[in-house]
Image (spheres, grey):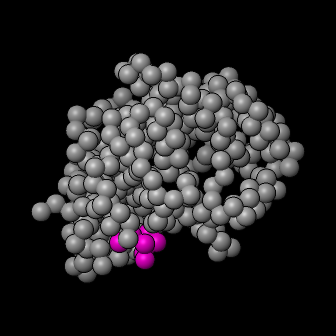
Amino acid sequence: MNKIITISIPAYNRPETLSRLLNSIPSECSDDIDILVIEDNSPKRLEIRKVIVQFRDKGLFDVKYIENEENLGFDGNIKKLVEKGEGEYMMLMGDDDFFIKNNLCSYIEFVKKNRNLGYILKNWKYLHSSGWEEPMNYFSKSQLFEPGVDTLLKLFRISVAMSGFNIKREYLTGLSTDIFNGTLLYQIYLLSEVVLKYPCGYCDIPIVYSMKEKTEVPFFGNSENEKHLYDPGIITIRNSVNFMMSFFRISDYLDEKYKINFSEKLRKNLSKYSYRVLAIQRQRVGTIDFIFYFRQLNDRVKINNTIYYYIYFIALLIFGTKICDSLLFLTKRIFRKTPN
């Protein structure tokens, strides 16, 4: 009998954090969970294989492990995880994140009570080196959403962080495509198709920790599907601009398929919440390059259509990310939620 959730992990070159992730899955949930790991032909394949063998030997979970013969890239590997999974729901997990152990079983009970939902947005926490657990709770309580464009606009941007992304596999039938290879957003394409047709929900139980490793480097750009868009090992201006343009490869596709004018609404939404989009380069480049990045976003991504976008730019330009982040963190500490 298939499990409620297949924890689906695209593994690439991170054996240490993969081990941490696997060992964070609580054995109390073993009746409801199986695990699928697909290794994407990385330099540390042998170390990753060893991690899987050692975890399997514990005998706590059903673990399926696959090694790709060639590097498929992020989107190709997600597509393969969809194809090879068996659980009622597919929960994606990045191999550098891990579960909040005491909460996952409670989350699964929420899923069991709401098995008509096509997609369930997770609550999660960003674990800072100081020990502060920054809340990423986008709504004040668990709730359900009707299918449609309004719900898609609510969930599209805040679902990009992959770990804990949970979607009903039955509703993904017939959606497989290669046209979004290189977007790094294949899961968001799947989300869009499901949210437009089926009810969805938000569970306010935080289930995932995400943190930035001191040695962390992005591996995007190594596959044939990605190298024309991304420079591996560093987050360049080119990477950031191309990633933002990927949002609109999906939204333009939806507009053409469903005649919904979603791209225009998405541009305004991303503009209002563009602080992180701008900050990711402000902390890496000097003033001249940051202004160049800002102009690239204006000219190519075209999210310069709200006052918030310009406020973020000016604040980051003058004060930098350290001061601006501190103000944002203070706001979150006061309101104990992600502000709208």
Q: Among all residues in the image, which is located at the extreme bottom?
A: 58
Q: Is residue 219 left or right of residue 49?
A: right
Q: Is residue 44 left or right of residue 64?
A: right
Residue 267 on image: x %, y %: 60, 29
For the image, the number of numbered tags is 0
Q: Using the image, determine if residue 114 lies above or below residue 83.
A: below
Q: Main secondary structure of the magenta part?
A: helix
For the N terminus, the image quarter is bottom left
* Residue 155 shows in the view: yes
* Residue 228 shows in the view: no
User: Residue at the location (87% across, 45% down)?
Assistant: 318
Q: Is residue 313 left or right of residue 152?
A: right
User: Residue at the location (64% across, 25% down)?
Assistant: 302
* Start-end of magenta stretch: 99-105
Residue 29 on image: x %, y %: 29, 73
Q: Is residue 233 left or right of residue 259?
A: right
